[in-house]
Amino acid sequence: MRTLALELRSKALTWRGRWLILLVAVAVAFAGQLMPEITKAATVVDVPESAVVARCDPAAKVDQTPAFLAWLKTHNAPGTTIRFKAGGCYWMNNIIDIHDQHDLTFDGNGAVFKTYSAGFDMLPSDQRFNIVWPRLRSMWRLEGGYDLVLKNMTIVGSNGGPNPGIDPRTGKLFRWDYYCPDVDQPDTFCLEGQAGITLFGVNADNLGVWGAKVENVTVKYVFGDGINLHGWGDHKPNRKIEVRDSLFQRAGRIGAVAQVVNGALFQNNIFLTPRRSMTVIEPWAPNMGSYNVTFDHNQFIDEDDPTDAKTGHAYMFADGGNTDAHVENITYSNNTLINQQVTTYINLGPDLTRRHTTRKNIKIINNKSNITVGSPFADQAPIRAAGIVGFEVRGNTQPIQPNQRNFGVSVYGAGDGPSSGIVVKDNTFANALGALYTDPAIPDATVCNNLVGLDSSLDRACVAPLAKIDNTPPTILVPAAGSTVSGNTILSARAAASSRRVEYLISGWPVFYLAHLGDATQSPYGWVYSWASQRFPDGTYYLKARAFDRLGNHVDGPQITVTVRNATGV
């Protein structure tokens, strides 16, 4: 009280004033829980060279992974920043496995982490990987946990480059473009799972302010992907992932994979000459969905082949995968492509059944390529999709090879009906026959203001929507605002007749930010969805409905509050 009196310059506090201060303090504390960028005070702990040697001595290649993981067990308190030796170099030939940790920052401090072999000469530090070793040897693996940061480091694999491993079958050094043949059961020598960084079910249960942040990290010459976002168990997704200001160079497979995720931002990164596609979202099981992923202001560079005539480096964005796995709300915006096309492949393949509703709301916006002619492949638009609901291609610069019968965009029907909600406008498709080719026809597609043809003339043949869109916001009817719910709870909303799709969104502790809850089904009782509220911790949540028209435009309805009570005796 004496200190408080001094701070208030000895002014007397009334009971009303004290209650006001108490309420403000509570409000600030609660707001601190909800604000996503609030961080805890960190303790910086340096990794001592007496415990983990920071010299990559070529004459003494001693794996430092066991030593580091043993040291970490006593220095992993939440709120800690683990700082490596400035400019140090570490032989890390096993998996740096950060398993179910939270509130940890790993600051490389400019250090380099290297492997010295392909992993055939050792066993994994975790016996869980025995049956797939060394195929799935990632260099850094963040599994489970939340509020994790990986920054300021370089990761160098042994797939060619300056630090090649030796192929035990031939005795020769591995090349960076080592190829794993496509077989039903990949053998020991298929190393395409050796990612530089693997995020595996990070923040799956939404316990963290964020899941993981990868900042200012360089990954070079790995056998597999530069960075891979994957799932675990019943394929719980990674959530709230940010990858910024990083370089992924000469990956033996894909630059970045995001195939089990709900909420990821890749921004201001460089993807340099992977062996295959720059980025991939190809979930291979029905429950491995990918939602709310954005690639913005990145550079995709092919330093080998300006014409892209080979099979590698073919796509900016490749999306195939399982028929029933959902890929929704994906945006590629403002990316620069050097010696590379704005190539996008969405949901194409030999089996197009049941795919009509698994690809939704995908946007390819304001991406620009520096090449003057497109792919030499005939009858293949660089941007292709099948079975998609809501597809916006706008503001891109993508040349087409002259004298090939190619359009800028091709969209096909699949399974149970044609695609819908297609917008193609404001693009430059030099040499193209036209901006959009569809099969079957899509009557409500919007196509306008595209530069096409040998003379880059303006395509003015715009097809407007058939009817005016009703922008009336949807309204949740059941449950009532302020209700207490438990177990499987039916949600029902009323939406405009022009709505093609309605989804429910949720926020609140421990979700923190607006997230996709589920897609509604249209019925005589409105747009309904069965919410398994027992999967959420007890507490207060905020629900609202979002309705989409046939062009992919959406309007949000008013938010309501509900309380979840499932715990016994509560």
Image (cartoon, rainbow, N blue to C red):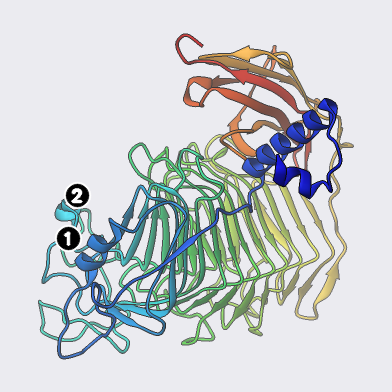
Q: Quadrant of the N terminus?
A: top right
Amino acid type of the residue tagged 1 in the rendering: Pro
Amino acid type of the residue tagged 2 in the rendering: Arg
On the image, which quarter does residue 499 sit in?
top right
Residue 124 badge: 1
Q: Are marks 1 and 2 in contact (CB under 8 Å)?
A: yes
**Above or below for 192 versus 559:** below
Identify the residue at image location x=84%, y=26%: 16
Using the image as rendered, state which of residue 426 and residue 103 is in the foreground. Answer: 103
Q: Position of residue 514 (x, y in %)?
A: 66, 39
- Left or right of 363 on screen, residue 77: left
What residue would you read off at disc 2?
Answer: 128
Residue 128 visible in the current orientation: yes
How packed mark 2 is, by other alpha carbons closer than 10 Å (few <14, some 14-19, many 20 or more), is few
Dot 1 falls on a residue whose secondary structure is loop
Using the image as rendered, state which of residue 353 and residue 211 is in the foreground. Answer: 211
Using the image as rendered, state which of residue 357 and residue 226 is in the foreground. Answer: 226
Dot 2 falls on a residue whose secondary structure is helix
